[in-house]
Amino acid sequence: MQELSLAQEFYLCSFNEKGNIPALKSVEVSVCLLAGAIIELVQEGYLSISENSQISISKQWDGQLPYLKPLYDKIASFSKPKDITGIMEAFELGLSQKPFTELMSAIGSNLAASGHALELSKQSMRKEKITYAPRPEAVTRVIEKVRAEFLEDGIMEEETMHLASLLDKSTLIGDYFSKVETAALKKRLKEVRASEEYAFVNAFLEITESAVAVFIAVVAATIAT
């Protein structure tokens, strides 16, 4: 099977056997999924970040990441650059909102096409609903990669650092690691981020985590009112 990207790996860890985000974690997971997709577009050069954390298009779309086109098109439609929080606000985050469901479907269908997920269909009163459920073996490979790099002194990849951070912020980390492993993983992540070698990665993680924290609070407050 092909190597997976940050957004694809986080999707596999986020969705259940029915191809849905667990209801109790929907806010956290939705925000982190979008954050992961933004990070990937930045890493691949499609987006750039200015000194004041504003994000804008930096490369024309070439079709290399088809599962992220809904996000790219949305950002390309902005009249001026936005920070990560602004992008989340404009993206209408929420499981029932079209921009977000388009992104979820694009990532899920791409994973199904590569054999990492199963396409499921459910007929409702109005229309057929298609979801994409991660294959258990694909999820296991992702988690074992994180375990190897963080808990077994493997080579630390930038993408894995981002993935571990998103698993932590989305509260999914406890679903895959024991309390002892989780504590060790968080400790290792903190140590690595403090090193000069990963200074740029850490700076970007801080921007992302701040936006995630703010937006999770905003969405949660909106739902509660």
Image (cartoon, helix red, strand yellow):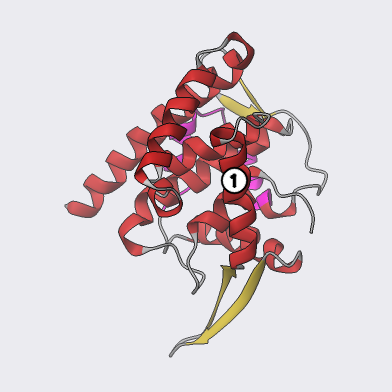
Could you say which quadrant of the image residue 80 lies in? top right
Q: Position of residue 122 (x, y in %)?
A: 51, 85
Q: Residue furthest left?
A: 225
Q: Say whether residue 39 is magenta.
A: no
Secondary structure beneath dot 1 equals helix
Q: Position of residue 13 (x, y in %)?
A: 52, 55
Provide the major secondary structure of the magenta segment.
Answer: helix
Q: Which residue is rendered at x = 67% and y = 37% of the image? A: 41
Q: Which residue is rendered at x = 30% and y = 59% of the image? A: 24
Amino acid at dot 1: Lys
Q: Position of residue 224 (x, y in %)?
A: 18, 53
Looking at the rendering, the stretch of residues picked out in magenta corresponds to 68-93
Q: Left or right? Give the position of 152 relative to 186.
A: right
For the residue pair 41 and 200, the one nearer the viewer reads as 200
Q: Where is the N terminus found, in terms of image quarters? A: bottom right
For the residue pair 109 and 133, the one nearer the viewer reads as 133
Q: Say whether residue 86 is magenta.
A: yes
Residue 1: tell me if it is visible: yes
Q: Which residue is rendered at x = 51% and y = 29% of the image? A: 82
Q: Left or right? Give the position of 183 relative to 16.
A: left
Q: Position of residue 214 (x, y in %)?
A: 33, 33
**Pointer 1: what residue?**
74
For the residue pair 187 and 132, the one nearer the viewer reads as 187
Q: Left or right? Give the position of 108 relative to 46.
A: left
